[in-house]
Amino acid sequence: MGGGGTTPSTTVQQTKQSNEPPAYIQPYLQKGIQDLTALYDKGGAPGYYPGATVAPPSAQTQAALTALYERGVRGSPYGKSIMANLNETMGGKYLDVDANPYFQKALSAGFKPQTEQFMQEVLPGLDGRFAGAGRYGSGAHTGTTDRAVDSLNRSQADAAAKASSSAYDAERSRMLGAAGTAAGLFPSLQAADYQDINAMGQAGAGWDRQNQARIDADIARYNYDANKDWNYINRYLASLNAGYPGSEMSGTVRGSAMPSTNPSADTWNTIFKGAGTVLPFFFPSDKRLKEDITPVGELHDGQTVYSYRYKGDPRTQIGLLAQEVERIHPEAVARHPSGFRMVDYRRATRSARAAPRGLM
């Protein structure tokens, strides 16, 4: 039967209530199930992807990792050399002038002209004056020569002491400067030293992502091929199930009245199960589901009653057309997720029941 609710007359006998799909769609569902059974009988479940699922590190990444490891073990060659020199300076290695070959060379370079002038001019002059006076080799000559040499030595010693003091102060300044340089320079030196390795790692990571993407694509293709037959049949059956309103209600017409009972809520819960909606008093009554539609009467409120058959079903039923009910009682019409209209006959015939007069 295509409708429900109490109506003006009771000349229709309900003969069947079924949760089965409409007869016209059952052969297709059976065919889909047979195909699934045949596919199951072919063998077991698809196997796991046979190849590697994780890409190995690329040559670029391996090179970067090796360089990073070696740099961590050995340290930066440039950084180590710079820091070693700074450590020596901070440790006062060059405070001792004897340990500073450059200081000694500087003193020698400064004293050499003075010593040469003394030996080539001063001493010969003294010798000449004493020789001219006939006192060459005398005690006065020797004493004068010794005092001149002593004066030269003291002069050079004083100069060396002053130079050493200046060198010490300068070296102390360099020690403090080296400490500051080490504090500020080492982090930047260390960071700069790793830039090349980081660049290598970034390049290698790009290759790794590409290699992994290729493996992932191979896995996806393998899984598709392994399951395509199952998925194809399941989509076919799902499409069939979505293409009809659900279970059917049928009866044998012995007059031209409306049905006298409502369908069970469980039947129509099944219809709307996929949409998550419960409409216990709605029947499929969409004009598109019916054929051989013929007017057979009229309700008190003017709604036309029709006889019809559901497509693919030889049994004749009577009821309303959802499209016409929607114009008069829109609150009595709902849409199934498939798009077909359904009618709540209690609401659709409420005004007719208010002053019943039967079918006209």
Image (spheres, grey):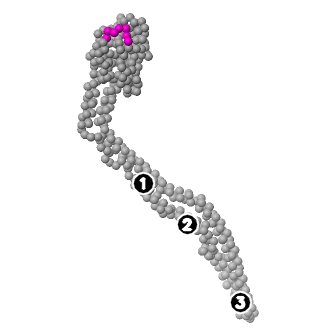
Q: Residues within 10 Å of mark 1 (few under 14, many from 20)?
A: many
Q: What percent of the width, then of the height, locates residue 335?
A: 40, 21
Q: Which residue is mark 1?
A: 61
Q: Nearer the viewer, mark 3 or mark 2?
A: 2
Q: Say whether marks 1 and 2 touch (CB < 8 Å).
A: no
Q: CA distance from mark 3 to mark 2?
A: 55 Å
Position of 291 relative to 155 (above/below): above
The answer to which of marks 1 and 2 sits earlier in the sequence is: 1
* Residue drawn at 36 percent across, 16 percent down: 262
Q: CA distance from mark 1 to mark 3?
A: 84 Å
Q: Which residue is mark 2?
A: 84
Question: Circle 1 — which element?
Answer: helix
Q: Which residues are magenta?
A: 6-12
Question: Circle 3 — which element?
Answer: helix
Q: Which residue is mark 3?
A: 127
Q: Residues within 10 Å of mark 2 (few under 14, many from 20)?
A: few
The answer to which of marks 3 and 2 sits earlier in the sequence is: 2
